[in-house]
Image (cartoon, rainbow, N blue to C red):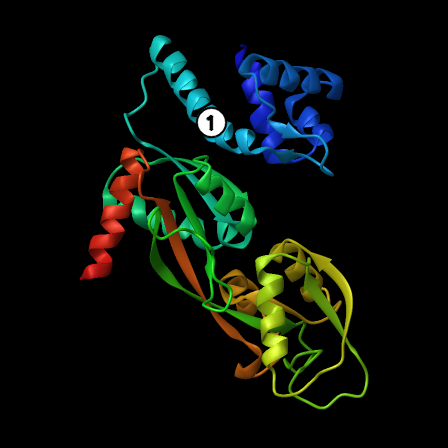
Amino acid sequence: MQIRWIEDFLTLADARAFSKAAENRNVSQPTLSRHVQALEDWLGVQLIDRREHGVQLTTAGRIFRGFAADMLKRTYEMRTVLRGQVPSKGDTVRFSVAHTLSLTYFPRWLRSVKERLDSNVITRVGAVNIPEGVAALIEGASDLLIIYHHPQLPILLDPKRFSYLPLGTDRLLPFSAPREDGGPLFSLNKATFSAIPFLAYAPGSYLAHAVEMILLGAPERIPLERNFDTHMAEALKAMIVEGHGLGWLPESCVTHELAEKQLAVAGSQQWSCPLEVRLYRANDNGSQMAERIWNLLQQEAQK
């Protein structure tokens, strides 16, 4: 077995496509495919279900992914030690963070944690959509997961195996580019006879479900004409700022734009919903620094 076989497999498991994984690994697609096949032959099990559309891991593949990530991490650490570059033991923490939170909430939160720990924390951060982050936590590919939560959109993690701590709250609000007088260019608060251009999240994403929940619970129907969707809140924000339509954004990601009067709130309280920011971990996680972070936050929450 060769280390590059494992690196190719983990890249493929993350990319979910042979072409993208090959590009990320800077090898040809046939070469990457041969390496994965060689790994499967060596293990004596099938890791990739090739009958499915796209790249899907088999049960064996999902189990092996966690072992492979840990094996690779330990191998790299061993090489570092042998080269005389010994890292601080237990300092590295693997985070999976929801895309929006990774750009807005996480950097400030991590700085605060480092200051309170008075310790260097080496972080490896993956910006993920929420299902990917949950899968990474279950498979042991990350130590800590930071995502949004709403009671009507629960994250299905076994409470016997996984614990969480609330970190704070956010709000999902409708926004529009402003008019010259500062009011919203598009508004949900006034009767309209023409459809409002609706900038949406891609179907299946967590924030798309949250927006749909708001719309289903609204006391009145507003004609919305969907003309754009994306998985990324930052891309949605850019479209709203440029006046392409109305869309919902977490309040935490528009602080600068509101201060610069590039955005205006486009609806009353009935068009918003609270979102809790949560930190999850596996109860049997072996990372020493992840345990220190968890204990610090847990102690602070109990005060």
Q: Is residue 54 above or below residue 153?
A: above
Return the residue nearer the eye: 126 or 9: 9
Q: Is residue 30 above or below residue 12?
A: above
Residue in view at x 35 percent, y 15 percent? 85
Residue 53 at what x, y percent from top left? Answer: 74, 39
Residue 49 at what x, y percent from top left? Answer: 66, 31
Q: Is residue 118 visible?
A: yes
Left or right, 201 with respect to 275, comes to right
Element at label 1 = helix
Residue hosting label 1 = 69
Q: Is residue 263 visible?
A: no
Left or right, 4 with respect to 235, comes to left
Residue 11 falls in image quadrant:
top right
Residue 61 at what x, y percent from top left? Answer: 55, 29
Residue in view at x 24 percent, y 59 percent? 301
Residue in view at x 27 percent, y 34 percent? 288
Return the residue nearer the eye: 283 or 238: 283
Residue 255 at what x, y percent from top left? Answer: 51, 64
Residue 46 falls in image quadrant:
top right
Q: Few, some or many C-alpha atoms within 10 Å of disc 1 (few <14, some 14-19, many ≥20)?
A: some
Residue in view at x 51 percent, y 67 percent? 251
